[in-house]
Image (tube, grey):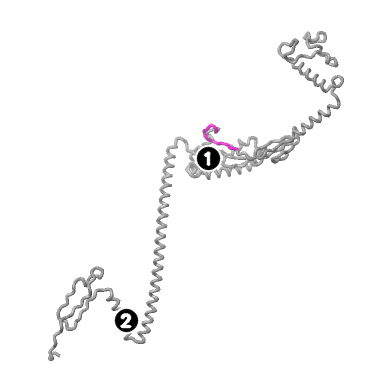
Amino acid sequence: MPWNDNANPGPWGSPSGGDDKRDQPRRPSGGGGGPRRPGGPDFNANFDQIAQRLRDMMGGPGGRPRRGLIPIVAGGVFALWAASGIYLVQPGEQAVVLTFGSYSRSASPGPNYHLPWPIERVEKVAVTKLNNTLVGGSGPEADSPAESQMLTGDEQIIDIDFSVTWRVSDAARYLFATRDPEAAVKAVAESAMREVVGKTQLQPIISTGRGQVQQQTAELMQRTLDSWGAGISIVEVQIRSANPPPEVVGAFREVNNAQQDADSAENEANTYRNRVINEAKGDAARITQAAQAYREQAVREATGEAARFNQIYTEYRRAPGVTRDRLYIETMQRILQSSNKVVIDAKGATAPIILPPDVFRPRSQAAAPALQVEAAPAQPQSKGAQ
């Protein structure tokens, strides 16, 4: 511009350098007096002004810095640079030190040191934090409802919404095995769940078999992630909802209700069976005990009868007549002891004997007293008849 050449110095003075700069008028830095260039502040002029002030502070002759101050400034800068390598690893964290972008070592919780940037840098990973990844569903936290549609082992479609709880087990593997660990966990979870559901019938999944499906899915996910060296540990897989397609929800509810009724009836039948079996076992035990008692009693009685018979036989051999009469009397005593008796003196009896009907009834119905019927005295016979 015409006012910026050597012949016509501009409004801020001559732009030439050298020792004459101290004598030049300083440009205003904002709202001071003096003319301004149209279109905004002059940044080059401001930068020159700041540089001049720094040279004045470090000043030597001609604006050159003092030689004794350079090592001090350089040492301070180096100390700050070296101190930038001090870092603290919090409890529950694991630090990974990278040397020129490559894995160098791991650091435990506490104060640690690494060579300052750009030689080394540190990545900290929370290894105790529980992370949660959702798969499937139609809620606001879900990505796509199509993720939940799976095919069961009996070729039925089911909508499954589940979550995966996981944590970092190895920080170095976690940082370098996959680019996006959370996306990898989600992909492995969906694949494992589809594989397990594809081998399982529909009814157990929507009723009582969820626990087994969750356990198998977690185990399959862990094996897959370990084969990748992902440094991730699966804590839990939880099925939040498992329902048939909306078009057949009513029919499946009826089937579920029928299954519950069948289970209830089966439980009642099992209860009745157990009660009857226990009662039968009790009766059998009582009958067995009674039979054993009867057997022991019969054996004792038979043993006693045999011993008595041997004694009687010994006495019979000594006095046959007396023993025979005694046995006869004892036998008749046992027989006549429990029956109604009628004693008749038949000596010289000529009139008919009439017995009352109660005599022939059992003693429990009518206990008739013993009757003694005496016949009429016999007539003396003539001597000729004799």
Which residue, given by chain and number where applicable, does mark 1 sit on? 239
Mark 2 surroundings within 10 Å by alpha-carbon count, few (fewer than 14), some (14 through 19), many (20 or more)? some
Residue found at x 38% / y 72%:
298
Mark 1 surroundings within 10 Å by alpha-carbon count, few (fewer than 14), some (14 through 19), many (20 or more)? some
Describe residue 64's horizontal placement relative to residue 267 as left or right.
Answer: right
Quarter of the picture holding the N terminus:
top right
Quadrant for residue 43, please give it.
Answer: top right
Quarter of the picture holding the C terminus:
bottom left
Q: Nearer the viewer, residue 31 or 258?
A: 31
Residue furthest to the right in view is 61
- The kind of residue tagged 2 is Leu
Magenta segment, which residues? 131-141
Quadrant for residue 223, please give it.
Answer: top right
Quadrant for residue 363, please give it.
Answer: bottom left
Label 2: state its secondary structure: helix
Residue contact at pointers 2 and 1, CB within 8 angstroms: no
Describe residue 165's horizontal placement relative to residue 269 as left or right.
Answer: right
Location of residue 83 in the rendering, given as x and y in whole percent from the top left corner: 76, 34
Location of residue 328 in the rendering, given as x and y in whole percent from the top left corner: 30, 81
Location of residue 282 in the rendering, given as x and y in whole percent from the top left corner: 41, 60
Which residue, given by chain and number where applicable, does mark 2 sit on? 327
Count up the numbered dots: 2
Q: Nearer the viewer, residue 202 or 331?
A: 331
Label 1: state its secondary structure: strand
- The kind of residue tagged 1 is Ile
Residue furthest to the front in view is 369
Magenta span contains residue 117: no
